[in-house]
Amino acid sequence: MNKNFKTDWQSALINAVTDPEELLTLLQLDLKLLPEALASAQQFPLKVPRGFLARIQKGNMHDPLLQQILPLGKELENTAGYIKDPLKEAEVNPTPGLLHKYHGRVLLTLTGVCAINCRYCFRREFPYEKNNPGKTGWQEAFQYITNDPSISEVILSGGDPLISTDDRLKRMTDLLTTIPHVKRLRIHTRIPIVLPERITTELITWLNALSLQKVIVLHCNHPAEISLPVKEAVQKLTDAGAVLLNQSVLLKGINDEASTLIALSETLFDAGILPYYLHKLDKIQGTAHFDVAPEVAQKLHETMLAHLPGYLVPKWVCEQPGAASKLSFNSLELCTD
Ligand SMILES: *Cc1c(COP(=O)(O)O)cnc(C)c1O
Ligand code: SF4
């Protein structure tokens, strides 16, 4: 194929808004915000696909989708306890591009790139440049998986793994399907939510043809993220035989009200997605203003339990370096620091 040929989704990606001034203008926001937006975007660039932007209410500084992508001066504040690698992932990184933290599953960081830059993200500090496996590195990663028969699940993650071309994804899974003990492929992606154009016929053909069991874990934080094109994309993924789950991050000013979380669960299920995890924010530098106090989180969780069927209540989890799994609500006292 001609290397310069761009598919529609690749064009949509290239056309994402990256200029803070354009963002403020398009959304009819106060240009007084520009200096701080520019300063924060220097640390971690602004990036938002136009389709996602269209779901943001114009002129509303408090729009929950806007709050996830707008660079603010608060990000430049240093808050005690918020550091660059709170999860100590450098210690569970046996070969470049591969994280083996929990029994039975490994996570491959296919890319450092995403279709959107979420301001609260751990990725703003992850040293992807140092962790880019290159060709021989990937061979090492596949060798690692081949050598450990306890690994039954491989998680494609990132960044966002669906940034990869269909060819690259196919090459990866062609290799993975030759490893007999690998039964499941999991994909951690926010792309069906933020860039549903990516769910093309070619991608669906690839998924359909896979002999592995397929789980797709989406990342959606607010019901307003689920537009009609998102629902259509999700339907195609379900039709291709994937189980669809969702993880959210509990974020102050975005989804820290019980009514929002309840509506999120209902809207997800309506689209064929089951709530999986509600994450406590990782203590990454520059994200302290998104943190929700544990007591507040606990109340929110109780309210959800009292209003929803059990299967629509996501597990409330946090990560603790060295733990054998993510820690859930019942062990909350272990993750309140
Ligand atoms: C979160 C995570 C997983 C997946 O954990 P589940 O509880 O199975 O969803 C796997 N590997 C790493 C490194 C992770 O951070
Ligand atoms: S899509 Fe996920 S990995 Fe990418 S910036 Fe957003 S939260 Fe981070």
Image (cartoon, rainbow, N blue to C red):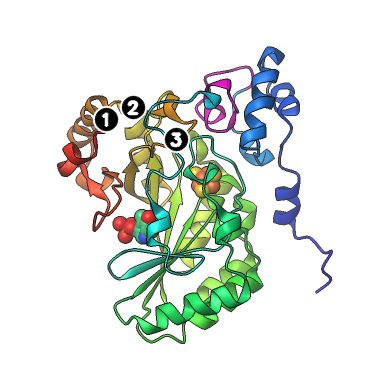
- Image coordinates of residue 33 in percent, x first then y, are 66, 16
Q: Quick one: label 2 or label 1, which is nearer the N terminus?
A: 2
Residue 222: which disc?
3
Q: Closer to the observer: label 2 or label 3?
A: 2
- In the image: residue 116, left or right of residue 105: right
Residue type at mark 3: give it.
His
User: What span is in magenta?
Assistant: 58-74
Residue on which disc 2 sits = 292
Residue type at mark 2: give it.
Val
- Count of residue discs: 3
Residue 324: which disc?
none
| Residue 326, above or below 93 | above
Query: What residue is drawn where x is 38% and y is 79%?
Result: 182
Residue on which disc 1 sits = 297
Query: What residue is drawn where x is 75% and y is 48%?
Result: 14
Mark 2–mark 3 Cα distance, whole angstroms, equals 16 Å
- Badge 1 local density, few (<14 within 10 Å), some, or many (20+)? many
| Residue 119, above or below 325 | above
- Image coordinates of residue 199 in percent, x first then y, are 60, 59
Tell me, yes or no, whether the highlighted magenta stretch contains residue 68. yes
Q: Quadrant of the N terminus?
A: bottom right
Query: What residue is drawn where x is 33% and y is 75%?
Result: 151
* Label 2 SS: loop
Q: Main SS type for the magenta part?
A: loop
